Structure formats: structure tokens, C-alpha cells
Image: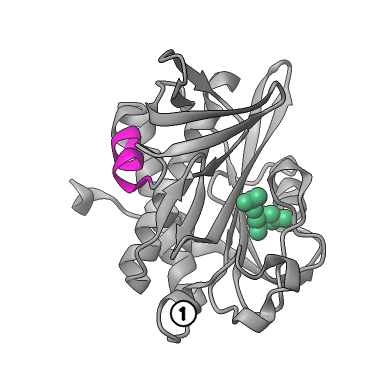
Amino acid sequence: KREAFVPGWTKGIQRLDTVGSTQEEAKILAEGGAPEGTTVMAEAQTGGRGRMGRKWHSPHGKGIWMSLVLRPNLPLALTPQLTLLAGVAVCTAIREVTGVPAGIKWPNDLLAGGRKICGILLESSLREGGLHYCIAGIGIAANLTEEDYPEELRGIGTSLLIEGGGIPVDRMRLAKAVLEELEYLYRVYLEQGFQPVKQLWESMSVTLGRQVWVNTPQGRTEATAVGLSDNGGLLLRNESGEVVSVLSGEIEMI
Ligand code: BTN
């Protein structure tokens, strides 16, 4: 089936040197009508952004800092599914290209050796109450050394170089593999729905079956991660045995 798939997104990657955030660059292109799959990749970001208003450390020439434009025809409530889809695509590409056994921590952090190797930020722009476009931002710590991390991130962040035994990653090759995987999976998703993505996500997850701390605006509770809900939330069994779904927020594995 895959043989019939001809990737298109990998052809037009726009490469920039230093930017504030590739999210902003991609947004400008999206506002100008750029087609789906339009991708910007920078050598460095001075204002790289993470989830929950955090900063994203993006040193020059060391990582894959890229953002792409998506224009799915989806109800807003289903965008968490896209976030999970992106995690699956990047995880697949990393495993294939580098052999590093990355796994997904809900919703879409990629971990290797227990530390973070990639983060994904999906931002949606609305028009007339519906989804206008999404910008999927992907940050992969490709060739960072321990010294490239500031003190406060050591022990939290790792890289493909570190986890791959010191072999540097060809960033362009990996970026292309990520885009190709994303485009393929996105097409499968539009044609067949969330089920195939959900199955892949569950098979790559390092969260399921684990005891976790859940941080939500309502507070912090302990629970067991038991699965994904159909809209992309995390299903948790709490201490009283009830299964509840969390759509956004953060978990810490215990
Ligand atoms: C997270 O784990 O909190 C998400 C991190 C997302 C980082 C990427 S790097 C490319 C794109 N540009 C940004 O400013 N952020 C995303």
C-alpha cells in the first residue's frame, strides 16, 4: 500500500539560519496562503517555544527545529489526535534513521534513555469559530552534547548523538524522513480516521501501564495510565478505580 504513496512535503523545506521561532515563520507563510506541508527549518532559534509557555533550547546547528503548515478539515475538538499523530511519525522516523529506541510519553514527548529527545508543539489558528490551520512544531535534539545543555536541563534532556553512542545524525536526512512519515500517516488518518494512529501510538508509548502523577488545572493526582480515548485524551484509572480521560495537561511517570 505504501508503494503507491509519493511524498511531496519533503521537496520544499525552507531553510533559515537564526530565527525567533520557526512557529512564527510558518504562521506568516500560512497566513499568506502557503499550502499544507510547507515547512520551515532553522539552524537556531532565539525564542524557541515549548508547551505550557516554556522556552525551548535551540542551539545553532545542533538540532532539527522545524514547523509545518497543516490545513485539516477537522472539528477543533479533534486536534489532540493530530498531536499524537505527529509524535508517532517522529518516533518512527527516529527509530528508522538512527536506531535509537525512542518511546512516546503522553501526549507527545519523545524519550530515550528516560530523558527527553524531542518535543512537539501543535498550535491552531481559528477562523469563524472553526479550525483555519495548524502549525506543527517539532524540535529534535539531534547532535547536542551534554555540554550544549544549560545546567537546569541536564538530566532532563538528551540527544540522538548521546543515545546513539556518539554517532552524529545527518539532520537533513532525518528531517526528510520525519516529513515523509508525517505526510504518509496524515494521509492514512484523513482516509481511515484515528484508529490506525491510536494503535501505533499505543505500541510506541512508554506511558501506558505506568503509575503516573497527573497535573491538571484542578490539581495533582496519582493514577494508572490505561489507554487512549477516541479523541486523543489519556485514559487514567484513579485510586477509586474510576477511568477518567484527560485531554491536556502533564504527567510524570512514577
Ligand atoms: C515541548 O515539548 O514543549 C514542545 C517543544 C517544541 C519545540 C519546537 S522547535 C521548532 C518549533 N519552534 C518553536 O518555537 N517550538 C517548536
Beta carbon at label 1 within 8 Å of ligand 1: no
SS majority, magenta = helix
Tell me how the rendering is colored: one colour
- Per the image, label 1 sits on a secondary structure element best described as loop
Residue type highlighted by circle 1: Val
Label 1 crowding class (10 Å Cα cut-off): few <14, some 14-19, many 20+?
some
Q: Position of residue 190 (x, y in %)?
A: 39, 31
Occupied quadrant, residue 36: top right
Q: Which residue is mark 1?
A: 169
Q: Residue at x 34, y 33 (%)?
A: 198
| Left or right: 202 in relation to 72 | left
User: Is residue 200 highlighted in magenta?
Assistant: yes
Occupied quadrant, residue 167: bottom left
The region drawn magenta spans 197-205
In terms of depth relative to the viewer, which is nearer, 194 or 132? Answer: 194
Q: Residue at x 60, y 72 (%)?
A: 63
Q: Position of residue 202 (x, y in %)?
A: 33, 39
| Image quadrant containing the N terminus | top left
